[in-house]
């Protein structure tokens, strides 16, 4: 079991190298402030996408409202920081915890009644919930003026920088990886593989579906909370149905049941979105929708299992086991008790 | 006191009475065969015992306590494990993980241990991994522990289902047509395996099986079902020559070996 820690050290070393690399690019003026913003956004999107990866990729629960939880995190954290925080680090932490918990608790409330059922009601319920949240954000100023309503919420202090976001990105990856390679991960995956069999094998499926949903939405909330501290402005359109679809695309394109796939695709996706803005120019920006659809169709045709098809990069793999390779044919007397 | 006691159990699907007035008492360390033509209601009885379907009428007591209305995962945790006629493995998982998953309720660590991979996590994982490998070895599957379940040959998949059920440490094991689709040599191994399970784990086995040679070889007694009702029960040699049973089978075109 020592290998587990070797792997963690490997990830931290890889992260350190990546960090130095980015800092060098910034120092050499290769990475302009604009692209730094895109990079930060890509890390934030990855954290949120990891949440959906847990819910859909590992546990098999189809959710169409992931961006709503991202939005709940952003608005909760944003409102706290704006009214109370004014840029203080302590309030930043409080706001992030609050944004994460708000998303997770609301997910728990939605998940408990719906996830008792064995069908795909979660997809429908989360779709409806996403629409409700969007309408709520558009009209939030009527209840709480600080939330800004349809014109958005402005005047946020950008407390989060690349370092802070990167640390949260790493923590999210490490904790999720550890969870997946534990009895909880096995319970989640068994539900995805065959819910009836999981139930018949003693897994409390309702409980673990709800746990995966709440944790996954909590990650969306965390991502939203970071977003609210990286950009001075929140707008309801950033959290509408199409954004939920973005998360879904990332998880499906990366390959269901692959943390590495989600990370690589999420980062790639964020850069692709901005890259297209340059390639297409402002006039043709609406063609991005066509390009998304094409990428989706081509990937599904060429690699229906997604880019990583359930596999992991080396440092995300489970520890290898030393199993006896010499099978004693036809004997089953080797049992100890 | 019987380990499992079923009385007056009935199940209707709409107008169809799949099981009617079924009685069965299973004693300690018994192997009982449940046979009957296709559509007789055998699998439905398993689904009723394991709580997948609610019963229309009747009672099911496990170790003296009613388990009617108990959710399936609870029934399994109480000590009734099963396999499925139409294999239901966790296909994309490794052979080892199929077994390890079932240890879940008896793994003693919490969420924090899982997030941080604490020494307690490591110790428990090592323990259940070893236990799982022992079970796989007993099923002669340990050399394939890291293969994906879906890539196993058919006979191995059936044996993995049994290993997985045993990982639940059951007192009663329900096997639904474990020999279906196996070749004669695999069937021979299976017969030995069921005897081994009975002797080694000291558990009670209720076995649904089509192949007469299997039930004749391993069962202490047989219960014969047709159209949801018991038409005969007794020792294997009694059943072999029972006129009603022969008619039920021959009428459906199944030969009695
Ligand atoms: N979920 C269900 N809904 C409706 N009918 C069912 C269902 N499950 C089983 N049946 C019917 O109940 C009868 C008994 O089926 P089953 O228990 O699977 O038979 P066996 O296992 O003995 O071959 C069959 O007529 C089957 O069609
Ligand atoms: Mg059947």
Image (cartoon, rainbow, N blue to C red):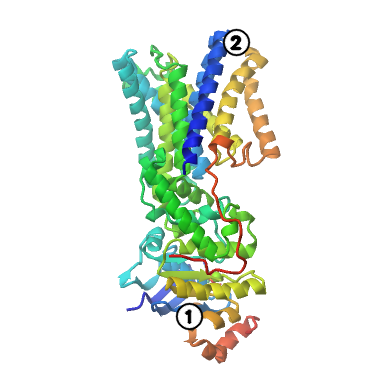
Tell me which chain the residue with mark 2 is part of: A
Quarter containing the C terminus of chain A:
bottom left
Closest to the observer: A162 or B24? Answer: A162
Q: Which mark is residue B103?
A: none
* Residue B180 rendering spot, x and y as whole percentages: 61, 70
* Residue A303 rendering spot, x and y as whole percentages: 67, 39
Q: Is residue A227 above or below residue A193?
A: above
Dot 2 crowding, Cα within 10 Å, few <14, some 14–19, many 20+: few
SS label for mark 1: strand
**Badge 1 residue CB within 8 Å of ligand 1:** no
User: Does the image show residue A134?
Assistant: no
* Residue B125 rendering spot, x and y as whole percentages: 44, 49
Are the residues under marks 2 and 1 on the same chain?
no
Q: Which mark is residue B229?
A: 1
Q: Is residue A334 above or below residue B143?
A: below
User: Does the image show residue A237?
Assistant: yes
Residue B216 sits in quarter = bottom right
Quadrant holding ligand 2?
bottom right
Tell me which chain the residue with mark 1 is part of: B
Dot 1 crowding, Cα within 10 Å, few <14, some 14–19, many 20+: many
Q: Is residue B77 above or below residue A30?
A: below
Closest to the observer: A66 or A311? Answer: A311
Residue B23 lies left or right of residue A13; in this view the side is left
Residue A117 lies left or right of residue B157; in this view the side is left
Q: Which residue is mark 2?
A: A30
* Residue B107 rendering spot, x and y as whole percentages: 39, 52
Which mark's residue is nearer the viewer, 2 or 1?
Answer: 2
The furthest residue to the left: A84
């Amino acid at each position: 079991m020592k290998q587990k820690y070797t792997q963690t050290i490997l990830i931290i070393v890889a992260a350190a190298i990546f960090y130095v690399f980015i800092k060098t690019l910034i120092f050499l003026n290769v990475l302009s402030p604009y692209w730094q913003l895109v990079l930060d956004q890509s890390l934030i999107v990855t954290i949120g996408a990891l949440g959906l990866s847990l819910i859909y990729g590992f546990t098999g629960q189809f959710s169409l409202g992931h961006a709503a939880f991202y939005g709940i995190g952003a608005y909760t954290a944003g409102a706290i920081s704006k009214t109370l925080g004014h840029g203080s680090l302590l309030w930043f932490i409080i706001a992030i915890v609050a944004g994460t918990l708000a998303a997770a608790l609301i997910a728990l409330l939605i998940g408990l009644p719906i996830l008792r059922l064995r069908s795909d009601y979660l997809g429908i319920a989360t779709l409806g919930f996403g629409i409700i949240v969007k309408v709520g954000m558009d009209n939030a100023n009527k209840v709480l003026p600080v939330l800004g309503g349809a014109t958005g919420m402005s005047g946020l202090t950008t407390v989060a920088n690349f370092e802070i976001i990167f640390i949260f990105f790493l923590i999210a990856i490490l904790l999720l990886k550890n969870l997946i390679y534990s009895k909880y991960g096995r319970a989640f995956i068994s539900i995805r593989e065959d819910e009836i069999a999981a139930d018949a094998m003693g897994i409390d499926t309702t409980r673990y579906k709800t746990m995966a949903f709440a944790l996954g939405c909590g990650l969306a909330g965390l991502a939203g909370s970071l977003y609210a501290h990286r950009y001075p402005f929140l707008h309801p359109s950033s959290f509408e149905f199409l954004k939920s679809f973005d998360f879904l695309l990332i998880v499906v394109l990366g390959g269901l049941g692959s943390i590495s796939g989600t990370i690589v695709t999420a980062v790639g996706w964020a850069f692709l979105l901005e890259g297209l803005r340059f390639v297409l120019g402002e006039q043709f920006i609406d063609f991005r929708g066509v390009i998304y659809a094409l990428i989706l169709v081509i990937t599904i045709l060429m690699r229906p299992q997604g880019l990583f098809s359930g596999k992991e990069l080396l440092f995300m793999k489970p520890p290898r086991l030393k199993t006896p390779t010499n099978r004693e044919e036809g004997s089953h007397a080797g049992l100890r008790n | 006191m019987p380990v499992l006691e079923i009385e007056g159990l009935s199940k209707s699907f709409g107008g169809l009475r799949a099981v009617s007035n079924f009685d069965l008492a299973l004693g300690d360390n018994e192997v009982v065969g449940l046979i009957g033509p296709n559509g007789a209601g055998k699998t439905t009885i398993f689904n009723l015992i394991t709580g997948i379907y609610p019963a229309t009428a009747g009672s099911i007591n496990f170790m003296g306590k009613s388990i009617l209305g108990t959710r399936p995962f609870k029934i399994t945790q109480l000590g009734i494990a099963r396999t499925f006629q139409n294999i239901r493995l966790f296909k994309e998982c490794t052979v080892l993980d199929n077994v390890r998953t079932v240890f879940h309720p008896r793994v003693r660590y919490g969420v924090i241990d899982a997030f941080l991979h604490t020494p307690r996590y490591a110790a428990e994982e090592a323990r259940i991994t070893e236990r799982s490998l022992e079970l796989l070895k007993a099923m002669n599957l340990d050399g394939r522990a890291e293969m994906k379940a879906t890539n196993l040959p058919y006979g191995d998949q059936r044996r993995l289902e049994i290993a997985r059920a045993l990982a639940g440490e059951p007192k009663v094991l329900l096997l639904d047509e474990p020999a279906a689709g196996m070749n004669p040599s695999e069937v021979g191994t299976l017969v030995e395996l069921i005897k081994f399970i009975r002797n080694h784990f000291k558990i009670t086995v209720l076995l649904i099986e089509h192949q007469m040679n299997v039930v004749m070889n391993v069962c202490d007694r047989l219960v014969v079902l047709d159209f949801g009702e018991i038409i005969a029960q007794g020792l294997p040699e009694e059943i072999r020559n029972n006129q009603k049973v022969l008619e039920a089978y021959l009428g459906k075109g199944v030969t009695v070996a």
